[in-house]
Image (cartoon, helix red, strand yellow):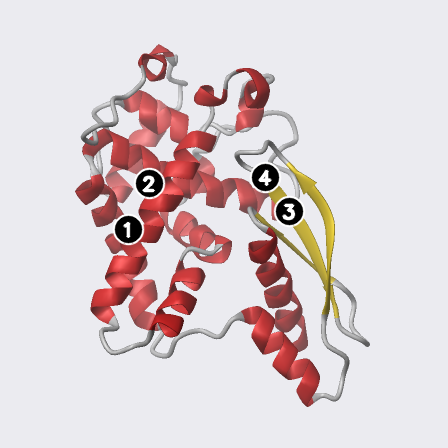
Amino acid sequence: MADGHPVQPVFRLFKLIDRMSDRADLERRIQHTFTDKALLHLALTHRSATADSAVTAPELTNERLEFLGDRVLGLSIADMSYVHFSTEPEGSLARRLAALVSRETLNEVADHMSLQDYIQVGGSEGEGENRTASITANACEALIGAVYLDAGFAAAKNLIVRYWQPLMEAVINPPKDAKTTLQEWAQGQGLPLPVYTLVESTGPAHSPEFKMTVTVEGHDPAIGVGASKRTATQVAATELLGRINK
């Protein structure tokens, strides 16, 4: 348990599902055995698994842990980048941070953990590539938050170092912002600047989800989904760049 963050009693009221033995495999994979098993269960419980949970019982879903884990991840990556890339300016470090906490990276880490095999969703919430990726990325952040509450910042950072350090070291030069790269490409082709449009905004106020499209003359629009307009914009730009570079 992290100092100053007592685990709410409601966490211990969960009836752990029959697959807890499978989740023990997940604990071995991430090299952290939970003292409070209910925290692990909570981290893997999408709001669709509890009827009306987004309105009546947010503490019974992984959204609050996702919020916490996002901050723990950001601080850890910022610290790791500051130390590892000791001569880089702030702008380069910021681009590295954005890439390493992106949904794409979260899903890459989650795939290494096989995390998608353990997430509890209800109904058809897990259907659709974008929706599934969003749920998995959020659960990855929630898992970090759960480790933080269970054993403190050092344990959470150890988990992050284990999975993110290789990804950090694999990128020698700081990544370019996808939106900037797409704009430079369009200008190089003599095309008008990309046009970004907000399609929809869904989800509760504390955990929104935005869908953006980007259009470049002569190319089909690309869609991006994220927890902020900026993130969704970057995802859309990345998607379109991927098509262009094929």
Give residue 127's position: percent from left, percent from top: 65, 38
Please, what is the three-letter code of the amino acid marked with disc 4? Pro
Please identify the quarter of the rendering in which residue 196 is found: bottom right
Residue at the image point whose x is 21% and y is 41% from the top: 153
Measure the C-alpha gap from mark 1 to mark 4: 24 Å
Please identify the quarter of the rendering in which residue 232 is found: bottom right
Please, what is the three-letter code of the amino acid marked with disc 1? Ile
Measure the C-alpha gap from mark 1 to mark 2: 8 Å
Position of residue 197 relative to residue 38, above or below, is: below
Q: Which residue is mark 4?
A: 208
Residue ranking furthest to the front = 90
Around disc 1, counting alpha carbons within 10 Å, would you say few (fewer than 14), some (14 to 19), or many (20 or more)? some
Residue at the image point whose x is 43% and y is 31% from the top: 64
Residue at the image point whose x is 30% and y is 77% from the top: 88
Please, what is the three-letter code of the amino acid marked with disc 2? Ile
Q: Which residue is mark 3?
A: 210
Q: Is residue 25 visible?
A: no
Q: Earlier in the sequence, mark 1 or mark 4?
A: 1
Q: Earlier in the sequence, mark 1 or mark 2?
A: 2
Q: Earlier in the sequence, mark 2 or mark 4?
A: 2
Give residue 17's position: percent from left, percent from top: 41, 18
Identify the image quadrant of the C terminus. Answer: bottom right
Please identify the quarter of the rendering in which residue 142 is found: top left
Q: Of discs 1 and 4, which sits in the foreground?
A: 4
Please, what is the three-letter code of the amino acid marked with disc 3? Phe
Measure the C-alpha gap from mark 4 to mark 3: 7 Å
Give residue 75's position: percent from left, percent from top: 30, 52
Q: Of discs 3 and 2, which sits in the foreground?
A: 3
Q: Is residue 112 left or right of residue 188?
A: left
Q: Is residue 193 left or right of residue 97?
A: right
Give residue 176's position: percent from left, percent from top: 48, 75
